[in-house]
Image (spheres, rainbow, N blue to C red):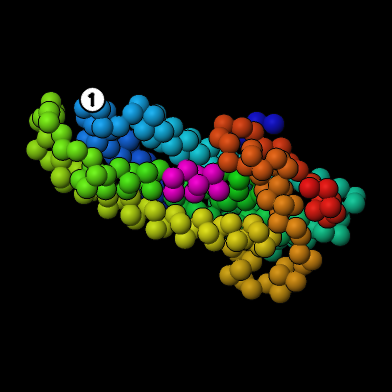
């Protein structure tokens, strides 16, 4: 099943997403030029270090773009309610449409989203049932890329041997220290912010509770019977196979697992 395209017209979201793309583009351009390629040419690092950096960078931007344009689980105007699920649907008091329980109305997007977690301005999209797995992948690869960037910045000044050759790019050579410090600052901000966000998201999936439900302190939702964590993660990622949860460029297939799933894993 392919990803359904969902595009949100929101200037604030475009600005926030533009900042993220700028940070990614800055580090993808300057970190290899300042650190990776010069040290590789002088034999201080192997080609594997360069390959890993570009792979993390590719997975990060791919996850960002996919999460930003993927349909989060928007409900159609006239949804077809299965007969067996009529009791689990309710009326939205904002758009006057029937929706499944645990759906929420996004005031910024103007529609209801199934199992909506929150609206994220950094991807200019809601995080819901159909793209939550992509948002988790984005957090995962952003954290890897930020940590790797900080590690390279640290090794460049405190571990690697000094470079003997002068960088051919005059601008990079003259402003190397400033460019590296900016990269370190961006890496720290991204790593700290994403670590906190990723932890919050993982605990939410683990406990089968969305960010909106946490903020609303909804007793009815929180008092639901606790599902096994394998079931909740499998439902979010669309597969029982844990090794596939953070594999990029795959498609998610809706997965509904019975409560006794824990007895079969």
Work out whether 40 lies above or below 179.
above
Residue name at image x 68 percent, y 72 percent: 218
Determine which quarter of the picture holds residue 32: top left
Give the main secondary structure, helix, strand or loop, of the magenta stretch: helix
Residue at 30%, 42% in the rendered image: 152
* Residue at the spot of label 1: 41
Examine the rendered structure and indicate whether residue 149 appears above or below residue 117. above
Please determine whether, in this image, residue 201 is positioned above or below residue 235: below
Q: Residue furthest right?
A: 83
* Residue 101 locus on image (x, y percent): 75, 59
Between residue 153 and residue 130, name the one nearer to us.
Answer: 153
Tell me if I can see residue 197 in this picture.
yes
**Which region shows up in magenta?**
136-144
Image point (12%, 41%), residue name: 175
The N terminus sits in image quarter: top right
Disc 1 on helix, strand or loop? Answer: helix
Q: Nearer the viewer, residue 66 or 91?
A: 66
Pick the residue in front: 117 or 251: 251
């Amino acid at each position: 099943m392919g990803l359904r395209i969902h595009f949100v017209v929101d200037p604030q979201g475009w600005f926030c997403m533009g900042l993220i793309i700028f940070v990614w583009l800055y580090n993808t351009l300057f970190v290899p030029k300042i650190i990776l390629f010069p040290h590789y040419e002088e034999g201080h690092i192997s080609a594997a270090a360069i390959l890993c950096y570009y792979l993390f960078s590719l997975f990060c931007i791919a996850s960002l773009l996919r999460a930003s344009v993927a349909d989060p689980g928007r409900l159609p105007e006239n949804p077809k309610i299965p007969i067996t699920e009529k009791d689990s649907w309710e009326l939205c008091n904002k758009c006057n449409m029937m929706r499944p329980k645990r759906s929420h109305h996004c005031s910024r997007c103007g529609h209801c989203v199934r199992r909506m977690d929150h609206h994220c301005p950094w991807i200019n999209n809601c995080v819901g049932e159909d793209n939550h797995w992509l948002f988790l992948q984005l957090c995962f690869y952003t954290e890897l890329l930020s940590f790797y960037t900080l590690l390279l910045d640290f090794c460049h000044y405190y571990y690697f041997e000094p470079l003997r050759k002068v960088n051919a790019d005059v601008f990079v050579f003259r402003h190397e220290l400033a460019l590296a410090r900016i990269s370190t600052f961006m890496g720290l901000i991204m790593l700290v912010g994403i670590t906190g966000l990723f932890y919050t998201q993982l605990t939410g999936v683990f406990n089968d509770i969305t960010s909106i439900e946490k903020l609303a302190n909804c007793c009815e939702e929180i008092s639901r019977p606790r599902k096994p964590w394998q079931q909740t993660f499998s439902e979010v990622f669309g597969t029982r196979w844990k090794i596939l949860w953070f594999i990029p460029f795959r498609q998610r297939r809706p997965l509904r697992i019975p409560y006794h799933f824990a007895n079969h894993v």
